[in-house]
Amino acid sequence: MEPTFFDVAVAGGDLRVARFGDGPSVVLGIHGITASSLSLAPVARHLGPAFTLVAPDLRGRGASNRLPGPFGMRAHAADCAAVIAHVGAAPAVVVGESMGAFVAVVLAAARPELVERLVLVDGGLPPPMPEGIDPDRVLDAVLGPALARLRQTFPSRQAYLEFWRAHPALVEDWNDDIEAYLDYDLEPADGDGFRSRVSEDAVRADGAQNLTDADVVGESLRALTCPVTLLRAPRGLLNQPTPLLPDFVVDQWREVLPQLADEVVTDTNHYTIAFGERGAKLVAERIAHSR
C-alpha cells in the first residue's frame, strides 16, 4: 500500500502526515521513538478498504525532522490532536506503537472528545523506575542499534539495509515493508553517504521524559475513560526472551484501568508485533474489532 502525504500546521512549522487507504473509517497511527509514519504501513494494509490510516512523522522524525522542540509526550499529543482535527475524524480509533502508545495515552486523556478507543502496541504502560537513573545510559542499553545508527553515516542505501538485516529482531522476518521504511528513513549526509533522518536530540528528550517523569503518562492513564486494548510481544527489541512489558507491569495498572483488555501476541518481538505479517494482521484485527 503506497501512502500519500500531506502537511498539518503545528507549533513551529508543518507536520508531515502519511495517508494509507481511502475508506470511511479513519484511524490515527502513532509510531515509535526512532521510527516514522511508514512503520504503520503493514498494519494499514491489513485494515482493508473500509479504513483510512493517517500517521504523522512525529516532530524530529521522518519528514518532520526539522520541526523544533519542545519534544515530549504532551507536545506529540498536541500535534496528533491537530492531525485528527485536520482530517475531521473525531472521535478516532488511535493505535500507538512503542513510544507512540505513550503519546496515544496522553492524547486520549487530554482530548477525550477526539479518541474513541486506544490500541496500544507494546507500549503505553510505564514500568517502575528507580530514582537517580541516568536516562542516556538507559536509552543506550535499551535501544541499542536503533540509537547507534543515528550517529552513523552509511556509504549507500544498500549499506543501511545490510546494517539492519543483521538485527536479531528482524533477521527472520525481513520483508518489503521493512525495506520501504528504511529507505524513507534516509537522507543525504553532509559530504558523501546517507544518514537517518531521526533527530537524536528528539529521541533523547522523549526518552528522558518517559524515564524520569513517568507522572506525565501515569496521570494520563488514571484519567482515561475510553476502552483500551493492549497488545504485547513476549520478546524484546533484540529478540531476547525479556519483554518490554512483563506481566508484573501490566498487573500494576489493572486496578487503574478496569477497561483494559490485555493480549500477548505469541511468537513476536518488539518489532515484528507490527512489522511481521502475523503481528500486523492481528493488530489490524484489534483495531477493526476490539475484544
Image (tube, grey):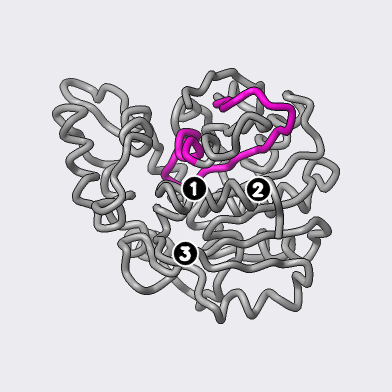
Which residue was labeled with disc 1?
Answer: 280
Between the C-alphas of marks 1 and 2, the distance is 11 Å
Tell me the SS state at disc 2: helix
Comes first in the chain, label 1 or label 2: 1
Lateral position of residue 3 relative to residue 253, left or right:
left
Comes first in the chain, label 1 or label 3: 3
Which residue was labeled with disc 2?
Answer: 287
Of residue 150 and residue 159, the one placed in the foreground of this image is: 159
Q: Quadrant of the C terminus?
A: bottom right
Give the amino acid at mark 1. Ala
- The crowding category of the residue bearing disc 3, from other C-alpha atoms within 10 Å (few below 14, some 14 to 19, many at least 20), is many
Lateral position of residue 36 relative to residue 158, left or right:
right
Comes first in the chain, label 2 or label 3: 3
Which residue was labeled with disc 3?
Answer: 233
- Write the residue at 61% across / 74% down: 250
Give the amino acid at mark 2. Ile
Tell me the SS state at disc 3: loop
- Write the residue at 18% across / 25% down: 193
- The crowding category of the residue bearing disc 2, from other C-alpha atoms within 10 Å (few below 14, some 14 to 19, many at least 20), is many
Residue 13 position, x and y percent, is 59, 22
Over which residues does the magenta segment extend? 18-42
Residue 154 sits in quarter: top left
Lateral position of residue 188 relative to residue 72, left or right:
left
Q: Is 40 a magenta residue?
A: yes
Between the C-alphas of marks 1 and 3, the distance is 12 Å
